[in-house]
Amino acid sequence: MAAPVRVFLSCRWLALRAARLGCRALTSSSSAGGGRSPWQLHSAVCLKRPAVVSQSKTPIQRDVEDLLQQMELEGSLYSDHELRLMEDEARLKRKQSNTYDSDEEDEDNEIVMGQDLEDMWEQKSRQFKTAPRVTETNVKNDKSSLNRKLENNLVLLVKEKIGNEEIWMFPQVAWECGETMRQTAERAIANLSDNSIKAHFLGNAPCGFYKYKFPKSVRTEDNTGAKVFFFKALHKSGDLSAIKKGGDYVWVSKDELKDYLKPAYLSEVQRFVIEL
């Protein structure tokens, strides 16, 4: 719990300092010279598409489920339908006996037997087809689609050019004067999708922090690198298919992050990217 508390207190300290001293408080150095800090503040968004279907049961889970159902069946009372089947069976036996008197039963009304109902239900159930758990995008391995890996949580990664290098990362933008860090994170999603993606942010405090230096080709004494605060958000609606070109973004599961993110960046985001 120590790391999240430190991140929260650090972000709160930045906000209080800005409120007292103005926008320059977040960009000025604490040195005697009072120059600008060489580190830029950024907000990044861990945008998660929750799992669409439940996880497939393991063999042990299926065995336990069968056992519990058998215990429930053996210890349960008869349902109304089961009682009706028993009554229908008793009625048929009376009709087949030599002592059966038709006046005892109302023959004018058409009787729908319980077995007839089961036959109708069986026909309807055969007509019902469940949606496939493995979609066409899974087969094609199209990672730009949200309709893949329905059993897993997916997060959005985008490819950004920093200097001469193209790097995969969470959507992020630089902080601007007058914004809170969460507002900066919201702007990262809005700029990325032209407001086509709707997301629900989980709180005002960041869930993680990462600090990196810019490539040497663009690094200067006044522009060393970025300090990134991560915020969590849940995907509600919208897609990037009409906004971004293929290959500029991917929706990946936690175990696929290692194929895109650099090791140092990956070690930080794995602390808060949780697969349930």
Image (spheres, helix red, strand yellow):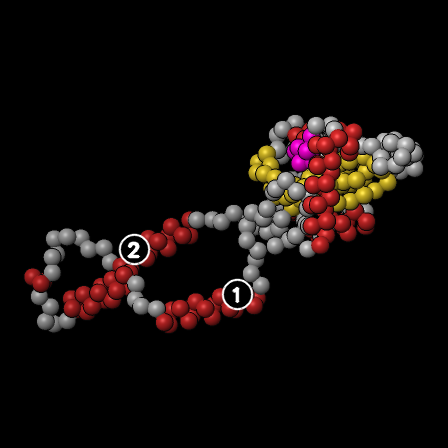
Count of labels in the image: 2
Q: Residue 135's spot in the image, x, y percent? A: 60, 46
Q: Quadrant of residue 20?
A: top right
- Residue type highlighted by circle 1: Arg
At 71% from the left and 45% from the top, the residue drawn is 9
Q: CA distance from mark 2 to mark 1?
A: 29 Å
Q: Earlier in the sequence, mark 2 or mark 1?
A: 1
**Residue drawn 37% across the image and 72% down it:** 74
Q: Which residue is mark 2?
A: 117
Disc 2 versus disc 1: nearer the observer: 1
Q: Position of residue 153 (x, y in %)?
A: 62, 48
Q: Is residue 119 magenta?
A: no
In this rendering, the answer to whether 274 lies above or below 230 is: below
Q: Residue at x 51, y 68 (%)?
A: 64
Whole-percent x, y for residue 162 in the image? 84, 35
The x and y percentages for residue 270 are 72, 51
Disc number placed over residue 62 in the picture, else none: 1
Q: Is residue 13 above or below residue 119?
A: above
Disc 1 element: helix
**Is 182 inside the magenta-drawn segment?**
yes
The amino acid marked with disc number 2 is Leu
Q: Is residue 31 visible?
A: yes
Could you tell me which residue is drawn at 19 percent across and 55 percent down?
Answer: 111
What stretch of residues is rendered in magenta?
179-186
Residue 162 can be seen in this image: no
166 relative to 80 in the view: left or right: right
**Disc 2 element:** helix
